[in-house]
Amino acid sequence: MRRWHILALTMLLAAQAQAYYFFTHYTSRTAPYNPVPEKFDLASLPNNTVTFFVSDQGPASYTANDSFASVLSQIRQAAQTWNSVSTSTLRVAFGGLYSSGTPQNTPVGQVQFVNLPPGVLGYGGVSSRLDISASSTGNFYPIQASYMHLSADLTKTWLPVQVGDGPSYTDEFFLSTVHEMGHALGLQHTFTSSAMSQSISRATTLARPIDADDIAGLSVLYPTPGFAAQFGTITGRVQFTTGAPVHMASVVAIRSGQPAISAYTNPDGTFTINGVPQGVYFIYAHPLPPDANANGLFWPLDPLGNQVTPSAPFNTVLYPGVTNFTTATPIQVSAGSTTANINFTVQARASVPLYDLIASTSYNGNYLQPAFLNENNPLGSAVARGVGLGSNGVAATGLNAQVLGGTANIYASLGYGDGSGNTYLAMYLQFGLGGATGPQHLIFSLPDFTFVLPSGVNLATQDPPSISSIGSNPDGSLTFTGTNFASDSRFFLDGYPLTVRSVDPVNGIAVITPPPAASGQRSTACVANDDGQNSFFAQQASPATFTFPVTGTPSLVVSPTSVPAGSEAMVDITGTNTNFVQSQILVGFGSSDVFVRRVFVLSPTHLQVDVSVRPAAAQTFTEVSVLSGMQWAALPYGFQIGPQNPLAPVALPSLVNSVSTGGGIYPGAMVSIFGTNLSTGTMPTVTFNGNPAAVLFFSAAQINVQLPSNLPSGPVQMVVSNGQASGLPVDVNINSTPAAIVSVLNAAGTMIDAGHPAKAGDTVMVLLSNFADPSTAVAPGRVQLMIGNTTQPAYLVAPYMNSGLFQVETIIPSGIPAGAQNLVVYLDGNASTVGTIYIGQ
């Protein structure tokens, strides 16, 4: 079954027992309805990761300074945006390019470029199985594939009304891509001005591409174990004055200066808003606009596949049953608890008189939506447009506008027309000095109806930033000069985030490290501040650009070119005219059946990749692509998935210290190797860079070995042979020889041993050799200690008496069992050898 959404940006939460903004099925036509969403089956995804691949048949047309490299950068950043949701167990990755028609059996996300009708920015959808699956978080319909369709014509531009989706380097393209990817992950539209709201009301920015509503939505679909304890829940019911339930009412929790969060009601009128940050909220229920379905909101389906449509329109009501925020009762929401019985009784009406309202401003003649205003200016103005504001240039009778809380006050408004029958409302705002900045919610009211526009106006303390010039420096860095830079400014080229070395806001100077890029690539620059403003606000028509040097066309050579299904393998890739950078590298194999575990950059023209090929992978040729920063290279049909070899061992490339949990992987360490078919009953052999390792234990699923003492640090090729066949080489990462614990002393300088144990509350000093350069200061925040199974921070880290040793001090916490406990010290995550500390009662 396929479902599609025409782009009209929006989103939020849902899960079992909620009709959030997921693609929802009801398992019964009567109460209880038991909503079941469509979502990815995490058990079918490698490392809980859905990977998005981009068609190698990119857009057909570009504007000046635009390129496929820019398109790839923006899609890559969109995937990272959704992957950053820490309360979601679903991981989202960008997999590079794929060739159309490549068969693949693992659930996948695909991005294609098509011709779109005027006004449509893109559309996305999911293809799901019709059988219900079960998980620990409830039943669901498994998504088999997701699709994002973006415009093939990026010569179209944004004007006061949207007429296209290009150019790709703009924040509009990026935010549209984030929105469509949200659909592809299983999210529908909501009306909270979040990333998943329709474009007419979306208020997210380059600095904040997703909002609380979006984070909650993804987290409810794919919750982490700690999700419920971090946020609050609101439950209640919406019914008509007749007592009949209201289906698909949008119930919104809102507070001044913060983003809104919402849910839809079930057919019995009940709702549950999960993922609500702790705080005090106003709650209101409002009807859907009459064009919600036409703009891409899909109604839930009953057991027969029929649409379950929303109830009739009704008047917006605020809890506990009023129509004005001044008489509404706010409620407290606490983390880990439920605020229940937030019920509404609403009056049915024939139609919705106000909807699709937006607020905008103009800066240097550029259209800004949502509206951004500098509160340091005594007065500001914003323009509202939408359905129901009035006619023939005259505001509707009784129309009023106000701001919810915050520091902005609308002291006057005026209706006017544009000569084409459209009516607008000019709002003149006055600001309180020193007040809160950020999103401000607008409330529009008629005598018998209220419309709320979350985050309709954003307040800042300065004008938007701008870039006046970009210059190259002898060390390869770039210097950006401009105005209104901030200490938190982020810099971009063609949507790719740049590494910032320094920012001088007073003089408007920033020094950044550029990424690799295509030969002669002419990139468009942007600077964004955390207040939501960016340099496109001031320089939409003529943004700053930078041209990279002319170099040769990159190409790739791959070895081996074929790997059997069900294998773990190292793939070696060499490049010509490439600039591989470890921190900016991305390698893809054009199929969701091939999962990239890790990439090792050996030089600017050489890298190695650990890949995992799924056992049920489709046997086919795939495309290999490498992105380093903004430079990309591809090798169509450069890799083949072959038939599975049932005799070969399959060893995972992640070694585990078999002596200490969290211990390091270093020459001479005893480690465990896990996998399948590792032994057929006889002792296997294991080599590292051709050097045999001593096998200490073996079974079909695990081998314990002692690593050779002469291994170099970095990637080392491991090969396991089970007596019947040899597995393919995989790269394992070997750390340098770790720091060694020399002794553990108490505050008096006495050795801690069985006769002089440490107790809870005691200060102890751990002396280590080979820990760090004694001439370099080590911040305590970089160091942690593991005492038994308890992690403890370091309070002092310093060289010890010119001995070449380092001392690390901590305090013994309570709750550690008495007796000898393992002790490990970590510096930047790198473990020392395992020591012993004695704990007394």
Image (cartoon, rainbow, N blue to C red):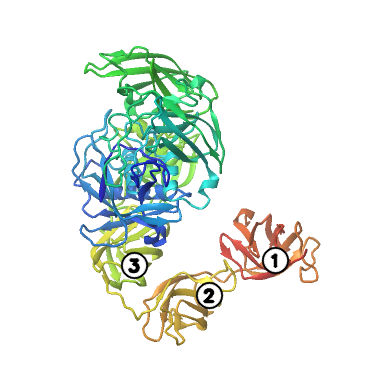
Residue at which label 1 appears: 767
Name the amino acid type tagged 2: Val
Depicted 633 relative to depicted 497: above or below: below
The answer to whether one can see residue 66 in this image is no
Q: Is residue 238 left or right of residue 330?
A: left
Structural distance between the alpha carbons of marks 1 and 3: 46 Å
Residue nearest the observer in this picture, 563 or 307:
307
Task: Give the number of the mark in front: 2 or 3.
Answer: 3
Name the amino acid type tagged 1: Leu
* Label 1 element class: strand
Q: Earlier in the sequence, mark 2 or mark 3?
A: 3
Task: Give the number of the mark in front: 1 or 3.
Answer: 3
Q: Residue at x 23, y 37 (%)?
A: 120
Structural distance between the alpha carbons of marks 1 and 2: 25 Å
Residue at which label 3 appears: 614
* Label 2 element class: strand
Residue at which label 2 appears: 671
Counting from the top left corner in percent of width and height, residue 579 is at 35, 59
Name the amino acid type tagged 3: Arg
